Amino acid sequence: MLTITAWTLAVIALILSSLVAGYYFGYENAKEDFAKKEKTENAKKVAYLKKMQEASKKEDEKSINEKLKDVLKKEEKQDNTTALLQSKEEIPVKKEESVKKGLNYTSASHEIDDENLDVISAIEIREIKQTSAKPRVAIIIDDVGTRSQVRAIKALSMPITMAFLPPSAARPNSAKLAAQESLYMVHLPMEAQSFSAEEPSTLRINDSQEKISSRIKEIKTLFPKVHYINNHTGSKFTSNEVAMQKLMNALQANDINFIDSRTTATTQAPKIMKSLGLPYVSRDVFLDHQMDKAFVNKQIKQVIEIAKKHGSAIAIGHPHANTILALAESKKLFEDVELVYINKMY
């Protein structure tokens, strides 16, 4: 009887152990299968998220380009950017055709008396302090004077300093547009060695101190928040030591800083600024005195290289279609530098 009972218990124990082992290993297998499925699902989710991010990025880029096209379209009658609407590709500009069709947008970049001046940096005599970990780059867009130009620049969502031309018949609302900005510059017309499209009230080398001071007071009234002025054209004016001394007298009296657009290698601004104990700040690179996008892209790379080498650099461009597009498509290039407004440069 005892033997039968022992065998019965042994069989029951064997059955129970088999059940427990089967349950345990089945659980482990199920657990392993679940982990594999979870890993697969997570991989699918990650792939889906990446796909969504790429789609979102493409959509953002498309949105930016569409927005730029929209705002620049409204400038069609003033700066001939119609070609921008045809595609994202650069707008071809041939010199002889640009003169014939009026595509040679008048700007300081077209008033350089030395064709190699754009590659001559004044960094050796410029006194800009680097206070950030990354090299700093400031981009100034000159010749701003219309609402659509402002909208196009702001659509870039980049810290770009706008330099407004004084009000004139061609741009009566420039001061009103500037008033809506917290920071801006005035792009002040000054006498050139040779320039066919001179602006009204251009400062001349023979102007008296009284006349120059009166003009600067007028500018301060029109643009009450202005603290920075750069020269529109001005190769003749900035080369004249007496004229520049008069200008600096007027600017200092109105708490305005001068930034040299450097349209001539013979500028007297460094000498005058040094005599006054003021830092000399100047443009290092013109972005678009040749208006094809490939050239603008090359100039953007150049200003970044100068900043990396010297700690800071200043570029000047204009509200051309190709300039706006080149900047929009070059945001990744600025990742190695800190893009700042002009007031962060010194």
Image: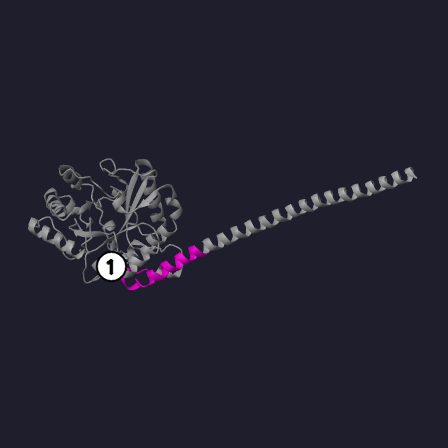
Q: Quarter of the image containing the N terminus?
A: top right
**Element under disc 1:** helix
**Residue 64 on the magenta span:** yes
Q: Where is residue 53? Give x, y as percent.
A: 49, 52
The residue sitting at 33% across, 62% down in the picture is 73
Q: Where is residue 313? Give x, y as percent.
A: 29, 41
Q: Quarter of the image containing the C terminus?
A: top left
Quarter of image, res 21? top right
Taking 81 as reference, is 24 left or right? right
| Depth check, front residue: 144 or 39 | 39
Q: Which residue is mark 1?
A: 177
Q: Is 36 above or below relative to 127?
A: below
Q: Which amino acid lies under the numbered mark 1 shown in the image of this protein?
A: Leu
Mark 1 neighbour class, 10 Å CA radius: few under 14, some 14 to 19, many 20 or more:
some
The residue sitting at 15% across, 57% down in the picture is 200
Taking 311 as reference, is 57 left or right? right
| Depth check, front residue: 7 or 77 | 7
| Outermost residue toward the right in this view | 1
Query: Which segment did they paint magenta?
Result: 59-82
Can the viewer see residue 173 in this picture?
Answer: yes
